């Protein structure tokens, strides 16, 4: 394994552990308000309060606890939605590209239509009817994200299915399933893996946007997106509020991208020679 | 009268109004090479793909050892596939770049669920069995084409459809691959349907030659006769077009 993959994996495991068990070890309630302690700066600044190393927000809630607890929702929604979106996109793209003809045109036409349809309207309507919860958020983000992956997958499949090695496989008796799983799926895996790493970050941000509009995580429960939104109006005076979820988000996306790069190189055998 | 290995009768393939293959009839016997020659776009490759049943012919009959293949579905065809295999023109696109040589040669065995000797196949086509762990991009063009031939031999076919098998190779490598094909034919008694536009290559391998023009066979006969004393105008033009001939 390359060092970059190892660093990325270790970092992501650390982040996952921190948000999973960190709040328990910390023993501070992320929802507890303490108005006299509001807008306390982080520990290295004048006026920092003991027990709030990363400072507090406008309601005096501890930011360390909020970032850790908020990470649970953000990471769950981000990883689950991007993984599901890519999985749906791969299946749809494989079928569309492999079957071709009117099925292909139908699926891609629906995809175009889907992209043109404003996601926010769908989100508002859905959440208005069924209410907001983590599974609903994951489903909505999956619906919003599958088209890109489906398009990329379809394009690669269209190209690869015409290759002679697929013909050779059919000529030796391969059925459709064998061609799809043995030749086409591995051919689209690399591109989708790289795309997945980008989508994770986007999904975490979109979840934040939805929460900001009151469509996502309900206050006072935190997510990185809600903390970012909370801090927006106070950026000039209390810049540390959006700093921590921003850093956590950046670090996560960076590590996922590092992981994606490493995995793509590991999957692409043609890179062997240059390594 | 015994049935020939391959008997193609009145084979046709149309794409809309275009008749890529138009009523083609020929036979190939065991141990015999029939070369199909013609210029680019004359329908040679479509013919090869129809015989290898990678495309469904629009009409006509393809009988292998008396068994009719043309109308069979993909599923019904599957167990018969081991009898005929295709060797492709460009070995850089006919081998999955993600697979090792061993995986590539083993694929037909896995698909047909039969046992086979991959190192033995590699040796038979003149490759070091050690190469089984390599990916195709680490091999030379000639080595890649040998892998393609080893894959085609894996199921012990009776007929090989060779679609321009040496066209993508350097001239020096061409001779080696041709010698390999001649040796394999002798040892295994294979029938070859050899598609080519290169008359020098054809004269080295073919027992009989069929000349294809605009989807039809315009002349068929023993190699010396067709290439030496062509009777059809198109064949004469083709033979005259060879540089230095």
Image (cartoon, coloured by chain):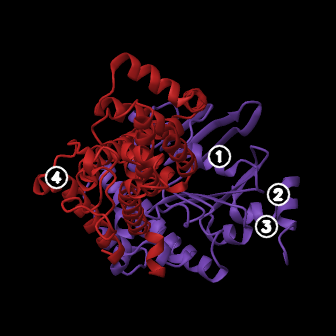
The image quadrant of residue A131 is top left
Q: Which residue is mark 2?
A: B235
Q: Kindly give the residue lying farthest to the top in the view shown.
A: A129
* Residue A114, image x, y percentages: 55, 29
Colour of chain A as rendered: red
Instruction: Please tell me whether mark 1 or mark 2 is closer to you in this view.
Output: 1
Between marks 2 and 3, how big is the CA–CA gap? 10 Å
Task: Identify the mark nearer the N-term, 1 or 2.
Answer: 1
Q: Residue at x 18, y 52 (%)?
A: A20
* Residue A21, image x, y percentages: 14, 54
Q: Residue at x 52, y 30 (%)?
A: A119
Q: Which residue is mark 3?
A: B228
Residue A104 shows in this picture: yes
Between marks 3 and 4, how big is the CA–CA gap? 90 Å
Q: Residue at x 54, y 60 (%)?
A: B32
Q: Which residue is mark 1?
A: B46
Tell me whether circle 3 and circle 4 mark residues in contact (CB < 8 Å): no
């Amino acid at each position: 394994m390359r060092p970059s993959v190892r660093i990325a994996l270790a970092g992501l495991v650390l982040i996952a552990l921190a948000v999973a068990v960190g709040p328990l070890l910390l023993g501070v309630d992320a929802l507890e308000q303490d108005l006299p302690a509001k807008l306390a700066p982080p520990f290295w600044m004048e006026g920092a309060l003991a027990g709030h190393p990363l400072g507090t927000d406008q309601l005096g809630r501890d930011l360390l606890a909020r970032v850790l607890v908020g990470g649970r929702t953000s990471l769950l929604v981000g990883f689950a939605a991007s993984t599901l979106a890519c999985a749906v996109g791969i299946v749809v793209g494989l079928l569309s590209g492999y079957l071709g003809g009117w099925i292909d045109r139908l699926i891609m036409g629906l995809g175009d239509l889907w992209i043109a349809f404003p996601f926010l309207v769908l989100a508002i309507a859905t959440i208005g009817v069924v209410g907001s919860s983590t599974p609903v958020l994951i489903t909505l983000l999956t619906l919003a994200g599958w088209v890109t992956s489906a398009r990329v997958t379809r394009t690669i499949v269209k190209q690869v299915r015409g290759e002679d090695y697929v013909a050779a496989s059919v000529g030796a008796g391969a059925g459709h399933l064998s061609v799809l799983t043995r030749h086409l799926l591995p051919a689209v895996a690399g591109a989708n893996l790289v795309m997945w790493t980008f989508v994770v970050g986007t999904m975490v941000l979109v979840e934040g946007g939805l929460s900001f509009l009151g469509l996502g995580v309900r206050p006072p429960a935190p997510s990185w997106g809600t903390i970012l939104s909370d801090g927006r109006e106070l950026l000039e005076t209390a810049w540390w509020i959006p700093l921590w979820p921003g850093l956590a988000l950046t670090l996560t996306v960076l590590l996922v991208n590092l992981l994606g790069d490493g995995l793509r190189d590991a999957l692409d055998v043609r890179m062997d020679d240059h390594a | 009268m015994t049935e020939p290995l391959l008997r193609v009768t009145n084979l046709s393939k149309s794409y809309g109004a275009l008749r890529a293959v138009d009523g083609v009839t020929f036979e190939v016997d065991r141990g015999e090479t029939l070369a199909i020659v013609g210029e680019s776009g004359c329908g040679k490759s479509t013919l090869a793909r129809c015989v290898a049943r990678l495309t469904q012919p629009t009409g006509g009959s393809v009988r292998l050892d008396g068994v009719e293949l043309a109308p069979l579905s993909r599923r019904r065809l599957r167990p018969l596939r081991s009898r005929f295999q295709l060797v492709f023109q460009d070995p850089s696109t006919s081998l999955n770049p993600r697979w090792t040589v061993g995986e590539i040669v083993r694929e037909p065995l896995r698909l047909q669920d039969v046992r086979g000797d991959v190192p033995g196949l590699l040796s038979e086509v003149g490759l070091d069995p050690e190469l089984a762990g390599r990916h195709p991009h680490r091999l030379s063009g000639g080595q890649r084409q040998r892998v393609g031939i080893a894959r085609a031999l894996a199921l012990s076919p009776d007929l090989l459809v060779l679609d321009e098998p040496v066209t993508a190779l350097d001239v020096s490598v061409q001779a080696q691959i041709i010698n390999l094909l001649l040796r394999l034919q002798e040892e295994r008694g294979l029938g070859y349907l050899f598609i080519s536009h290169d008359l020098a290559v054809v004269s080295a391998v073919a027992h009989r030659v069929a000349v294809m023009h605009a989807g039809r066979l315009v002349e068929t006969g023993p190699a010396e006769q067709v290439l030496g004393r062509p009777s059809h105008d198109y064949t004469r033009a083709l033979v005259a077009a060879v540089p230095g001939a």
